[in-house]
């Protein structure tokens, strides 16, 4: 039972290595790339939840939650 911390560390190192192998490069995405990724989701939300106002309200709430 006392050896569980060491096993957890080893497991986390393995998971980080696997995650790093799938990511293209470290760091943040370019804002235009992030925008291009979000636009299809935004369009889906407009259709699914009935209008631009609902989407803008949700986006505003997320922005406030993130502190921007």
Image: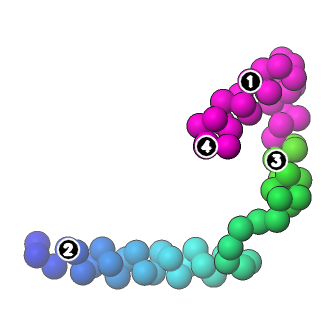
Q: Which residue is mark 4?
A: 66
Residue located at (58% from left, 74% from top): 19
Horizontal side of residue 8 vs 32, given as left or right:
left
Q: Nearer the viewer, mark 1 or mark 3?
A: 1
User: Which badge, 4 or 2, comes first in the chain's sequence?
Assistant: 2
Q: Residue at x 74, y 33 (%)?
A: 59
Judge from the rendering whether residue 19 lies leftward or rightward of residue 26; answer left or right. Answer: left
Tell me the CA gap for discs 4 and 2: 35 Å
What residue range appears in magenta?
41-68
Element type at mark 1: helix
What secondary structure is the magenta-colored segment mainly? helix
Q: Is residue 48 left or right of residue 68?
A: right
The residue identified by callout 2 is 4
The quadrant of the picture occupied by the N terminus is bottom left
Instruction: State how far apart marks 1 and 3 are (Cα).
Output: 16 Å
> What residue is disc 1 on?
57
Q: Are there few (<14), some (14-19), or many (20+) residues within 10 Å of tag 3?
A: few
Dot 3: element:
helix
Q: Which residue is mark 3?
A: 38
- The Cα atoms of the two marked residues, 3 and 4, are separated by 16 Å
* Lower sequence index among marks 4 and 1: 1
Real-space Cα distance between discs 2 and 1?
46 Å
Above-or-below relation of 27 to 34: below
What residue is drawn where x is 50% and y is 76%? 16
Across and down, in percent, residue 31 comes to 83, 59
Mark 4 or 2, closer to the camera: 4
Q: Secondary structure at mark 2?
A: helix
**Which circle's residue, 1 or 3, is located before the other in the chain?**
3
For mark 4, give the secondary structure: helix
**How far separated are the C-alphas under marks 4 and 1?**
14 Å
Image marks 2 and 1: residues in contact by CB distance under 8 Å: no
């Amino acid at each position: 039972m006392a050896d569980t911390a060491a096993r957890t560390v080893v497991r986390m190192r393995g998971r980080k290595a696997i995650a790093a192998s799938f990511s293209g490069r470290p760091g943040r995405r370019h804002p235009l790339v992030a925008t291009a990724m979000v636009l299809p989701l935004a369009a889906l939300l407009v259709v699914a939840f009935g209008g631009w106002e609902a989407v803008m309200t949700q986006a505003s709430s997320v922005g406030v939650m993130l502190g921007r």
